[in-house]
Image: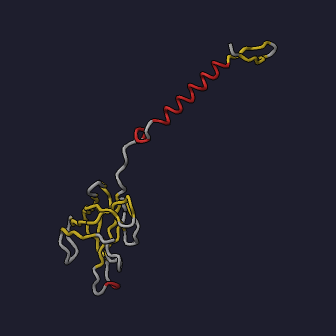
Amino acid sequence: MDSMEASRGTRPVRVRRRGVRRAALLCALAALAAAAVPASAARTPAAPDPLVVVDCFDKPQVRPEEYLLACGDGNNRLVDLHWKSWGPGTATATGTDMVNDCRPYCAAGHFRAYPVTVTLSEPRSWPGHHDVRRFTTIRLLYTGTAPHPVPKDVTYKLVY
């Protein structure tokens, strides 16, 4: 019998080396078995690619509270957006479209509020940003009057 002596207080204690070796071997085998499980079995299903709307400054936004429609002059902005849904194919919000009436000209014009339902759709890959998709279409459905000469239901391509 393979053993060694250790002292506990004044009495010698015999420890079996074979038992210690067996326990160490079992631990090592358990660790190897755990490592052999494919990583895919341990992972949860992959999340879909992030879905964003890109703003005028080329920044990705998710459920933005505001969104600038007129990037050049800032005369049209969606505000107070409350998102009812977001993805995977569409996103829908209610809010207000603040539009400058530009009367008599834009610098002297006044911003008017128009209640609107906003729908983002047609997600596509965002060039230069692998694994990120962006909405490419925005639909504005005015629930009251629409700003002149815009129709009550209008759809635009998002080019940013």
Q: How is the image coloured?
A: secondary structure
Q: Residue furthest bottom?
A: 104
Residue in view at x 30 percent, y 78 percent: 100
Q: Quadrant of the N terminus?
A: top right
Q: Is residue 102 above or below residue 147?
A: below
Residue 87: x percent and y percent?
30, 55
Query: Left or right: 43 with respect to 118?
Result: right
- Residue 155 occupies which quadrant of the picture? bottom left
Residue in view at x 37 percent, y 56 percent: 50
Q: Is residue 84 above or below residue 7?
A: below
Decide which of 160, 45 is in the foreground and name it: 45
Residue 120: x percent and y percent?
27, 62
Residue 2: x percent and y percent?
69, 16
Decide which of 160, 66 is in the foreground and name it: 160
Decide which of 50, 69 is in the foreground and name it: 50
Q: Is residue 126 above or below residue 75?
A: above
Residue in view at x 29 percent, y 83 percent: 102
Residue in view at x 21 percent, y 65 percent: 141
Q: Residue furthest front?
A: 1
Q: Is residue 76 above or below residue 94?
A: below
Q: How many discs mark residues in the rendered view?
A: 0
- Residue 134 occupies which quadrant of the picture? bottom left
Q: Residue furthest right?
A: 10
Q: Quadrant of the C terminus?
A: bottom left
Decide which of 140, 107 is in the foreground and name it: 140
